[in-house]
Image (cartoon, rainbow, N blue to C red):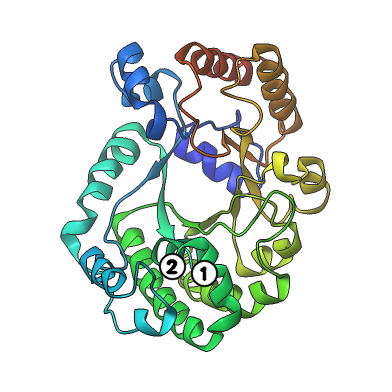
């Protein structure tokens, strides 16, 4: 079975020949991986990764315009002022060259399932406002934020369609909503200010018969029903270290979506506890032996993880998923 077929089997709620694997390893560990393996690509090939996370495309806002606004207002940008800035062109073809290159490498040459990171609504604007101010603006500038979110959602829809035109298999929407125990804002705020604008992109992707993935750190249990209603096929990371129970997922939600995750970077990998690392990997892989999981790190593995620990983890994963059952 080809890697891409294996991933699609999981997303379509079929039992794959083995659990598909991946890991967010490059951001913080590129140098030690390259020193040990020659390159991150060679590491990915050694462990026969089944899917790939692609980045690229234009950014929503011109950085120079944001910098000018901050210089004029003591470093802060409020919602009414942001509406004066025009967004970058989402149809700038040259901005997608990195995605084209990565699609050739992963999908065409290695038959991997390729998903591309796209902006959400809340997280992408934290870079503009700052997260603390953004949370405050939810209460102070609801009308203006609705206009900003509507504009962002239409931009996201065009970005997602352009990526699908290039041949990506799944649109991966990154939009952190959770803290360690609950949402960063009320569920009512989510339904009123986040859900409608996600729906614009989600509906467009589903119309194309493509797959949808959501990334949100933290505990988002309060709005899982809304995530399902939006049509997300995959949820990453479904973070156990933030109280998201994988047993509850299997019992209540496994018919609605699959989980991408299982290797927790907050509590499991990168802490030098090889016994715990082994037991946690085996626990999760055994739990999903019949499907429902795209095994992956819950976020970027941090730079305190040694190459010895990383290699230990992926040697174990590689061998365990290939054992005769």
Residue at (51, 62) in percent of width and height: 131
Write down the quadrant of residue 107 in the picture.
top left
Query: Camera-side residue: 45 or 279?
Result: 279
- Is residue 325 in view? no
Q: Which quarter of the figure is the C terminus placed in?
A: top right
**Residue 169: percent from left, percent from top:** 42, 51
Q: Does residue 203 sit above or below 233 in this rendering?
A: below
Distance in Å between CA atoms under marks 2 and 1: 6 Å
**Residue 14: percent from left, percent from top:** 65, 43
The answer to whether the residue labelled 2 contacts the one labelled 1, judged by CB atoms less than 8 Å apart, is yes
Q: Which residue is mark 1?
A: 134
Q: Secondary structure at mark 1?
A: helix
- Image disc number at residue 282: none
Q: State which tag comes first along the sequence, 2 or 1.
A: 2
Residue at (16, 58) in percent of width and height: 94
Q: Which residue is mark 2?
A: 129
């Amino acid at each position: 079975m080809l890697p891409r077929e294996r991933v699609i089997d999981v997303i379509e709620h079929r039992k794959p020949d083995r659990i598909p694997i991946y890991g967010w390893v490059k951001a913080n560990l590129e140098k030690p991986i390259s020193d040990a393996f020659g390159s991150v690509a060679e590491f990915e090939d050694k462990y026969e990764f089944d899917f790939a996370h692609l980045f690229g495309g234009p950014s929503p806002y011109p950085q120079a315009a944001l910098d000018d606004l901050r210089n004029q207002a003591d470093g802060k940008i409020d919602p009414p002022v942001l509406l004066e800035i025009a967004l970058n062109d989402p149809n700038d073809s040259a901005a997608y060259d990195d995605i084209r290159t990565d699609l050739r490498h992963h999908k065409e040459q290695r038959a991997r399932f390729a998903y591309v990171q796209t902006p959400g609504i809340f997280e992408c604007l934290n870079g503009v406002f700052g997260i603390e101010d953004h949370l405050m603006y939810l209460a102070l500038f609801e009308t203006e934020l609705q206009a900003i979110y509507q504009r962002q959602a239409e931009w996201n829809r065009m970005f997602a369609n352009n990526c699908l035109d290039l041949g990506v298999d799944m649109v991966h929407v990154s939009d952190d909503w959770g803290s360690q125990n609950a949402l960063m804002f009320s569920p009512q705020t989510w339904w009123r200010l986040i859900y409608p604008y996600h729906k614009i992109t989600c509906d467009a992707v589903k119309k194309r018969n493509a797959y949808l993935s959501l990334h949100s750190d933290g505990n988002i249990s309060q709005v899982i029903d809304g995530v399902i209603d939006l049509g997300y096929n995959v949820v990453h990371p479904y973070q156990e270290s933030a109280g998201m129970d994988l047993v509850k997922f299997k019992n209540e939600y496994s018919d609605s979506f699959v989980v991408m995750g299982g290797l927790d970077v907050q509590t499991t990998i990168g802490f030098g506890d090889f016994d715990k690392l082994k037991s946690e990997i085996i626990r999760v892989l055994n739990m999903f032996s019949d499907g429902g999981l795209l095994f992956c790190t819950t976020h970027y593995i941090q730079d305190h993880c040694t190459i010895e620990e990383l290699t230990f983890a992926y040697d174990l994963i590689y061998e365990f998923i290939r054992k005769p059952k």
